[in-house]
Amino acid sequence: MRNLVPVKLPRVGFLILAVCFSAGLPSALAAVQDLERIVAIVNDDVVLEGELDDRISMVLEQLNAQNTSLPPEEAIRRQVLERIIVEKLQLQLADSNNIQVDDEALNASIREIASKNNMSLEEFRNILEAENHSFASFREELRNQIRINQVRQQMVGNRIKITDQEIENFFASEEAAGDVGAEYHLAHILITVPEAASPEQVQAARKKAEDVLQRLQAGSDFAEMAVAVSAGQTALQGGDLGWRKVAELPSVAADTIRQMRAGDISDLLRNPSGFHIVKLMDVRGGAAHYVSQTHARHILLTAGELSSADDARVRLEQLRERLVGGEDFAALARSHSQDKLSASRGGDLGWINPGDMIPRFEAAMDKLQPGEISEPVKTQFGWHLIQVLARRQHDSTDDYQRAKAREAILSYKTNVETDLWLRRLRDEAYVEYRIDEGSAPLE
């Protein structure tokens, strides 16, 4: 499939090919056994062979597009089945919490995907269907993906807090290491250890991780190995974590990564989730960050009980004529603007960063030259006259780095808590494998 830009959503793996059953488990099984073989039972739901085969085809298509070397077919089959099981468990939790996505919200998400790929909705639909992907199926896959994101936000995201002290500690650690602002492109393999694992289970996981590391050191392809054996959330993307700050990784890995060069593979790294192997793909960052700032002021008029929106617009047009005629902007703002906070400063909004203002106001402001006064501009707050006083390139490195630090800490906490939550969700579920009668699932 053509490489499409996804909606900005937390990572949840590949889209879901959902099969819903409204009956209880026994009747559901009876209804489907005559039609298609069941490869797994997941609580009161099932995974069908066709569902698994369809997902495997999607994964193979993406891996081939990325030129990733493929592990044996059986390894992919078991890895994909485990991913479907975990997704079904999250959808079951969404059902029990009445988390739904209506058609209006779904359509908005699809339009956003099309827009990010510089396509109309019709063009996007045609691309899908030209490559033999059902648009109706895509809609339901995306609906389930959004529901999973909402479940994760409810169960994990809403509980995560970041303090100013954590940000200060983050900067202190980066300054001490001399890599403020640095980012690392990483790939990752995780061999999990169960919660409250016995010494035998820990030793078995360690042995498996050591075998994987030895094969990597002997020249095996990292992405292929990740697809085959990793329990990480990005396993089916070849373990690619993308660009991360060190704060987004367990502290046990931070010092190791700082000492690595592009292409290096770490030794085994242990934390409560299990054994990790990290490959450093590349390093970047540390440069100053400049933004284009605008110094502007405005006069705001709103509709009131005794006046309409049209009245406000007409009054602003009259004020604009007075300003063009030479009257003082600050004086008129103090006497007429209904934005009381800025009116006391003569309408002055100070230096504005991109994204600080609502889109319609910012779009009108960006078209103005310094000294120029806009025509009346309508937003949800009322009607505005805008004047740009000056523009500058501002070094916002500190603000930028603090924002990136907050993002990094949030990402790290979210990843850790999501992994732990998914492990508990999986461990507490009833799962019966039927993928190969008599064979054990890949652990």
Image: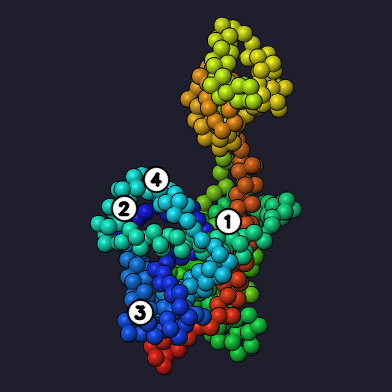
**From the viewer's perspective, is the residue at label 4 or at label 2 nearer?**
2
Q: Earlier in the sequence, mark 4 or mark 2?
A: 4
Residue 201 in view (yes/no): yes
- The amino acid sitting under disc 2 is Arg
Between 266 and 296, the one lying in front of the other is 296
User: Mark 4 to mark 2: distance in Å?
Assistant: 12 Å
In the picture of the structure, the residue carrying the numbered disc 4 is 115
Pointer 2 local density, CA inside 10 Å: few below 14, some 14–19, many at least 20: some
Q: Quadrant of residue 427?
A: bottom right
Is residue 13 shown left or right of residue 314? left
**Depicted 36 relative to depicted 110: above or below:** below
| Helix, strand or loop status at disc 3 | helix
Q: Which mark is residue 49?
A: 3
Labelled pair 4, 2 in contact (Cβ < 8 Å): no
In the picture of the structure, the residue carrying the numbered disc 2 is 125
- The amino acid sitting under disc 1 is Lys
Q: Give the farthest residue toward the top.
A: 325
